[in-house]
DNA sequence: TCCATGAGTGCAGTGTAGTGAAACTAATTT
DNA sequence: AAATTAGTTTCACTACACTGCACTCATGGA
């Protein structure tokens, strides 16, 4: 991502937020403690603000810093056929399919998991903030997070923070199938 | 929001991302163009990086800048039993079940939908930024967004922007069941 | 017409982000 | 032992973000 894209997004966001609140440059300057001249430069994308400056501006506008640096993209409808999906074989009768995923503005992945009886999978510790949400289509899942185990039955659901190591296990006697949603940073071993 | 909170979040995020990719400081420095000494300071939250620096680091790690500055609050493990879920009956043989949901920092809901043949559901126009992601467990879904229809077969998946009116329809002859994820990254920017 | 308000520019001065290199730990490894 | 690798600190130096103030240029009332 080009740094100018970010500063441009910041420019748009700051200006839009300020306009939305009908604040003048002087008001925002007084409220944020950032000089008016600097605000002009930020709103024109002609500077390279520090986190400190950005934080003060975001606070004065009542929004999060994350929103300030969000690049608005144009979403479209994307259909993924079953034949095009990536499948990660994991054992005999076990596999994980990445159904569909996005990476902006919020990273989301939708997975279809199958675990044969006795099988398990150890998930990596995702970056802080990562959450996983899943529902059991058939069978019974034993989820271990934070050193504690939770049993989720068929049609049950669970949401948890995945920034720690965690394990999915099929300790039952029937095949296990569940759909999982992963949100937050993704773990593609890119380039 | 305290600037130190942001720099602390950046520190955690950068360190977690780098560790997850098993990159050394030298590798990240070479890839990002940010000096190794600076990276150490960033990862310790002892500096006030500029957007330019942040962008280069985020790029080298393959994540968005917005994610770098996100403050992660840690939700606990929450298991929802099938008996406790809220079901919205929708017709004969049709129903939507809210499996599990969160509302901070981003709204995330997991739904289990069933539509009998001939049934349909019109979704409201969600706030800007809302996305829906779903996969078909059985049957065939006809999704209409932006005035255009898309047919998604069993095991297929689709992601689309839900800030416009949209319709789920079962135009097939078999029962339709699909799991849907609704995400709304931003709360309404007012007050 | 004068006056007020808001947006934007220009500039000297200051603080500090950021660099590059060197040197120091503390684990591995040969 | 010696050599390697990764993390951390220190230091001098440069670049520029940021401030504060004083301007100009609009628009819009009284």
Image (tube, coloured by chain):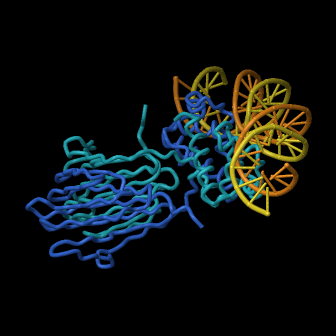
Chain colours: A cyan, B blue, C orange, D yellow
A79 left or right, relative to C15: left
- Residue found 58% across the figure and 27% down from its top: B30
Q: Is residue B78 above or below residue A179?
A: below
Residue at left offset 43%, top offset 44%: A187
Report whether A66 appears left or right of A152. right
**B97 or B32, which lies in front?**
B97
> Where does residue B36 sit, x and y in percent of width and height?
65, 32
Residue A150 versus residue C5 in the image, above or below:
below
Task: Residue at 22%, 65% (x, y): give it.
Answer: A139
Residue D30 found in image quarter = bottom right
Give the image location of residue A191, x and y in percent. 43, 31
Residue lying at 39% horizontally and 57% vertically, measured from the top left: B163
Return the residue nearer the eye: B145 or D30: D30
Q: Is residue C11 left or right of residue A150?
A: right
Q: Position of residue B114 (x, y in %)?
A: 20, 67
Q: Quadrant of residue D17?
A: top right
């Amino acid at each position: 991502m080009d740094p100018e894209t970010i500063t441009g997004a910041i420019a748009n966001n700051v200006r839009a937020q300020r306009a939305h609140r009908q604040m003048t440059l002087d008001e925002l300057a007084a409220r944020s403690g950032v000089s008016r001249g600097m605000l002009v430069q930020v709103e024109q994308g002609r500077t390279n603000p520090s986190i400190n400056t950005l934080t003060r501006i975001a606070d004065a506008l009542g929004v999060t810093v994350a929103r300030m640096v969000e690049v608005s993209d144009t979403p479209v409808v994307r259909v993924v056929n079953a034949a095009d999906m990536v499948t990660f074989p994991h054992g005999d009768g076990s596999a994980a399919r990445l159904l569909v995923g996005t990476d902006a503005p919020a990273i989301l992945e939708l997975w279809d998991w199958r675990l044969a009886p006795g099988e398990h999978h150890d998930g990596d510790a995702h970056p802080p903030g990562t959450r996983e949400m899943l529902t059991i289509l058939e069978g019974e899942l034993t989820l271990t997070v934070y050193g504690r185990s939770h049993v989720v039955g068929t049609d049950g659901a669970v949401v948890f923070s995945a920034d720690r190591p965690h394990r999915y296990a099929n300790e039952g006697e029937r095949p296990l199938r569940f759909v999982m949603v992963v949100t937050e940073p993704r773990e593609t071993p890119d380039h």
